[in-house]
């Protein structure tokens, strides 16, 4: 974090953060990731940096300007909108945001919509140190799910996955192993 007379700046190395920023014309507020810069103009917004390098920006109130490697001029994103920046630095067209889903993590809720199983496991493991989820012999992007979960309850995911015909679940002390069944 850098606070200077002419700039307020945060670098988000990983994870997710919600920012509520007062407008100061002489000291703009910026959030940077490896590929993205978000400039706030008196606003509230969420920035999520995913493990694959993708960045998601959801605007709760006000407006932000997002610039990336391939869009240095930037694009305005208003309240109720979201932008997705791909790992290559490409800014996808903005769209309507489900703000309550974007900030659900503050209430320790995980919201998934067509999310690959490996991403779901990553999110659960971010929140739970007592029980870790582990994937074995499952092809990436082969299983996608929708749902809302308590972030502190990875066993609830295992209970659902236990019904899948091509998966097996092994519960071990401190670990739940999700395995693909051989054909």
Image (spheres, rainbow, N blue to C red):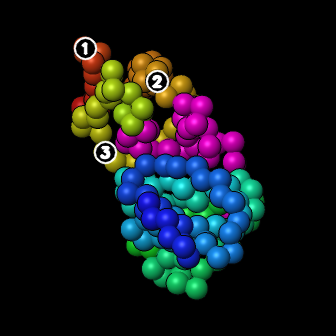
Tell me: residue 183, above or below residue 163: below
Residue behind mark 2: 152
Q: For mark 1, does the 10 Å Cα neighbourhood hold few (<14), some (14 to 19), or many (20 or more) residues?
A: few
- Residue occupying the point 36% across, 34% down: 125
> Which segment did they paint magenta?
94-123
Q: Are marks 1 and 3 in contact (CB under 8 Å)?
A: no
Judging depth in this view, the residue of 152 and 165 nearest the camera is 152
Which mark is first along the chain, 3 or 1?
Answer: 3
Residue 58 falls in image quadrant: bottom right
- Determine whether, in the image, residue 37 is placed left or right of residue 122: right
- Residue occupying the point 31% across, 45% down: 139
Q: CA distance from mark 1 to mark 2?
A: 16 Å
How far across and down, in percent of the image, does residue 155 sit? 42, 19
Residue behind mark 1: 173
Q: Nearer the viewer, mark 3 or mark 2?
A: 2
Which mark is first along the chain, 2 or 1?
Answer: 2
- Please state, as top left, top right, bottom left or bottom right, where the N terminus lies in the image: bottom left
Q: Nearer the viewer, mark 1 or mark 3?
A: 1
């Amino acid at each position: 974090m850098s606070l200077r007379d002419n700039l307020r700046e945060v670098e988000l190395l990983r994870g997710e953060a919600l920012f509520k920023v007062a407008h100061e014309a002489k000291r703009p507020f910026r959030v940077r990731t490896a590929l993205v810069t978000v400039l706030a103009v008196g606003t509230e917004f969420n920035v999520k940096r995913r493990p694959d390098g993708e960045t998601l920006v959801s605007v709760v109130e006000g407006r932000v300007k997002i610039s990336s490697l391939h869009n240095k001029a930037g694009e305005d994103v208003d309240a109720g909108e979201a932008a997705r920046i791909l790992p290559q630095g490409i800014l996808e067209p903005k769209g309507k945001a489900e703000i309550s889903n974007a900030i659900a993590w503050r209430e320790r809720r995980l919201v998934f919509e067509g999310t690959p199983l490996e991403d779901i496991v990553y999110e659960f493991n971010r929140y739970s140190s007592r029980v870790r989820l582990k994937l074995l012999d499952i092809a990436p992007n082969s299983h996608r799910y929708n749902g809302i979960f308590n972030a502190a309850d990875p066993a609830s995911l295992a209970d659902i996955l236990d019904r899948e015909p091509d998966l097996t679940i092994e519960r071990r002390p401190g670990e739940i192993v999700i395995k693909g069944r051989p054909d």
